[in-house]
Amino acid sequence: MKRAVAFVALLALTLPSLAFAQSGEDETKFDPSHEWELQTWGPDLKIGPIDMSINKAVAYLILGMICSIALGLVLMRVRPGRGPNRRQALGETIYEVAQVQVAEQGLPTKAIGRWFPYVATLMIFIWVINMLGFIPLPLSDERWDIGGVEVPTFAIFAATSTLSVTLALALMTFVFTHVEGIRENGAVRYFKSWIPDVPKAMLPLIIPLEILGQFMRLISLSIRLYANMLAGHMLILTFIGLIFVLENVFLAIVSVPAATAFYLFEVVIVVSIQAYIFAALSAIYIGSAIEPEH
Amino acid sequence: MLSSSFFFLAAAEDGADAGKAIALALGIGLGALGAGVGIGNIFGSMIQAVARQPELRGELTGIQWLGFALTEAVVFYGLIGGLLAYVLV
């Protein structure tokens, strides 16, 4: 089993490197940061200042949406009464993690019914798009031709390694936190609950800090996910790219195992941890807005 | 002495690039330094806690990973700061 996993990972890592070798001859040197330049596919759909055109990240998001819906349908919609099978057990495990580890950690009991679907969706969706980011898919901007047909090269790219995606997700939590806080406590009581018990003379110093702290949550929530995925992909791409930057094929002896190690670390630990953290922190933020400490 | 002055001359030619590279390396390096201490602290405390009260392991695991991710993010704030210095300045 372990050998099979290592073999598949190695295979997955050699696929994009083939693509780099293809494009490396006529173009300039390989630069990992080019992987994050998003080119528009098809027509420019600009509505005023809003850019609605499709690019790589949007394609990954749509694919992630389809996959997470399919995951829900396959694992959760099990016909009852036939005794539990493996699929149902997996679905129940995911549900239990979302319920016990994420929702009950942050949300007060009365709010679980309303906000459990949101945090569970966040967890599954982020996990799926993170995971898709480590599977080589033919969705990159570079092209190569097989027998005259232009085919996109295989590449690894996560939608969560663009800041816009994670910022949109974090903004959702940010808006829901304050809407729910105001709805549950009333605007005056909610905003008053931000201010801790301190002497009156300290208030001019504390109030701006507390307001800044609310926005820092938004920044830290989005940057955490974004930078984790960005750094993971950049590490893998840089190690593979060393072969092409230094133009020495013997570097593969060192760089491919190193890239494989980072790849396995990312897939096994980082992907799940980040999905869990994002959902758990969303639950904690929403929960703390519903029931302020004082 | 000779090698250091040579390095200085070489750096003076593209001092801006060198400065950017130093900013990137320092951003990641110092961020990783702090986060390394923090993560070690978290797992060390976790080991101690489980050694004293093994029955609490399940409850502590969630908190442990939460703390791990919060601490680990510090590296990436440094990385993003370094990248900003590298790309924008």
Image: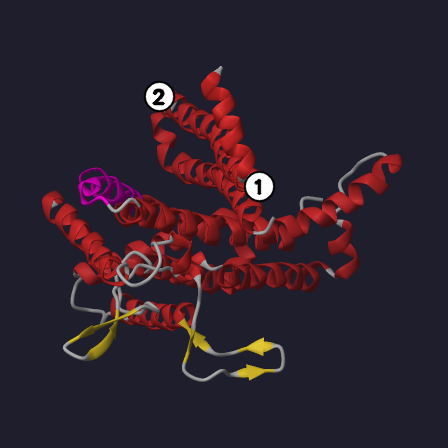
Helix, strand or loop at disc 2?
helix
Q: What stretch is highlighted in magenta?
A: A248-265
Image quadrant holding the C terminus of chain A, namely top right
The residue marked by circle 1 belongs to what chain? B
Disc 1, SS: helix
Any mark on residue B16, and which?
A: 1
Residue that protrudes farthest toward the top in the picture: B1
Q: Residue A36, located in which quarter of the rendered image?
A: bottom left
Q: Nearest the camera: A120 or A34?
A: A34
Q: What count of labels does the image hold?
A: 2
Taking the image as drawn, is residue B84 in sight? yes
Whether residue B23 is visible: no
Mark 1 or 2: in front is 1
| Amino acid at the residue labelled 2 | Ala
State left or right for residue B22 relative to residue A243. Answer: right
User: Hey, what amino acid is under mark 1?
Assistant: Ala
Q: What crowding class fits label 1: few (fewer than 14 Cα within 10 Å), some (14-19), or many (20 or more)?
A: few
Q: Position of residue A225 (x, y in %)?
A: 46, 51
Around disc 2, counting alpha carbons within 10 Å, would you say few (fewer than 14), some (14 to 19), or many (20 or more)?
A: few
Which mark sits nearer the N-terminus, 1 or 2? 1
Q: At 20% from the left edge and 62% from the top edge, which residue is drawn?
A: A87
Q: Where is residue A86 in the image (x, y as percent from the top left)?
A: 17, 59
User: Mostly what secondary structure, the magenta segment?
Assistant: helix
Q: Which residue is drawn at 54% across and 37% down?
A: B13
Q: Position of residue A73 (x, y in %)?
A: 29, 72
Q: Do the residues labelled 1 and 2 touch (CB within 8 Å)?
A: no
Please check whether the numbered discs 1 and 2 fall on a single chain. Answer: yes
| Callout 2: chain | B
Q: Residue A142's spot in the image, x, y percent?
A: 32, 68
Asked if residue A284 is positioned above or below residue A148 in the image, the reply reads above
The residue to which callout 2 is attached is B51
